[in-house]
Amino acid sequence: MLLNFLNEIVINTSPRNRNNFRLTLGTFLQTLEENEIIKLNFIKTIKVLKSVPNRNKTFSLEVEKSIFKHLTKEDPILLLYIKFVAYNFLRPIEVSRLRIKDVDLVNRTLTFQAKNSKLKKKIIPQMLFDEIPDLSNLNPNHLLFTPTEIGGAWDTKETNRRNYFSKRFKQKVKEHFNLNEDFGLYSFRHTYITKLYRVILKNATPFEAKSKLMLITGHNSMSALEKYLRDIDAELAEDYSNLLKE
């Protein structure tokens, strides 16, 4: 019966969701097995399906401007959250971890826990610095982003905080602009890294552009950055029509 349930999940949603349900059920049944309530946790015999994560697409300039204009009136907190993703190239989970003490407005630096690594530091670009309100009188241990204010207490896991802002983005932006599942908060990171790379590339070789970009985005290696740029289609070939002419 559980196998049929998992099959329904993968048909109606995705292999990733099916694997997540399998993991949750397996953890529960493992507890029952260890307490001798059941003889065998048979979930362990069900294979994990191969799951290829979906990459969010980049926004067109027109859509991006429309979103920013809309959120300026409708949701300034969400807009600032997005600008940390767009201008500082942070992942949504990294923005959700930020606390007041992590934002050094005197030295214009940002300290954050990056994906699967120790603490990192980045400069705060002027365009983001100009958007950040005065934080000097706020509790340094409070989170930078909460549902109702900049700088406050929010007693929930960081994944819940990220998921909250993802859902808020869906309600305030995706539904309003009729955007499909190809677009999400990550789209802003992809969009602005693509913009920056193409601007740098105008006056530099591809290697020089990537070397400079790597310092800004925080990728750990050139190969990791190159793979990322390929995944988001930031690097496109020049017009090759002349090569096909007789």
Image: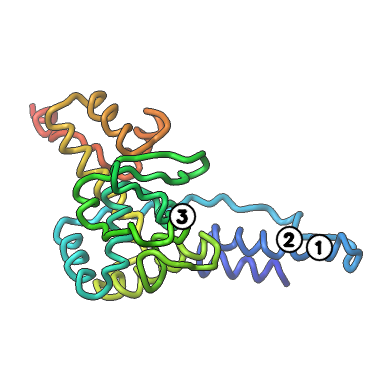
What colour scheme was applied to this rendering of the protein?
rainbow
Local crowd size for mark 1, using a 10 Å CA cut-off: few (<14), some (14–19), many (≥20)? few
Residue matched to label 1? 31
116 with respect to 214 (left or right) = right
Give me the disc on residue 97: 3
Q: What is the x, y in percent for residue 176?
A: 26, 75
Q: What is the x, y in percent for residue 61?
A: 15, 56
Q: Helix, strand, or loop for circle 2?
A: helix
Q: Which residue does the image show at 28% across and 59% down from the upper left?
A: 134
**In the displayed image of the protein, which residue is found farthest to the front?**
137
Q: Which residue does the image show at 35% across and 65% down from the upper left?
A: 150
How far separated are the C-alphas under marks 1 and 3? 31 Å
Q: What is the x, y in percent for residue 200?
A: 17, 33
Q: Helix, strand, or loop for circle 1?
A: helix
> Answer yes or no: do the residues labelled 1 and 2 have beta carbons within 8 Å?
yes
Q: Helix, strand, or loop for circle 3?
A: helix
2 with respect to 237 (left or right) = right
Observer-side mark, 1 or 3, equals: 3
Frontmost residue, 189 versus 45: 189
- Asked where in the image residue 215 lies, by quadrant, the reply is top left
Q: Which residue does the image show at 20% across and 69% down from the upper left?
A: 72
Residue matched to label 2? 27
Name the kind of residue labelled 3 in the image: Arg
Name the kind of residue labelled 2 in the image: Thr
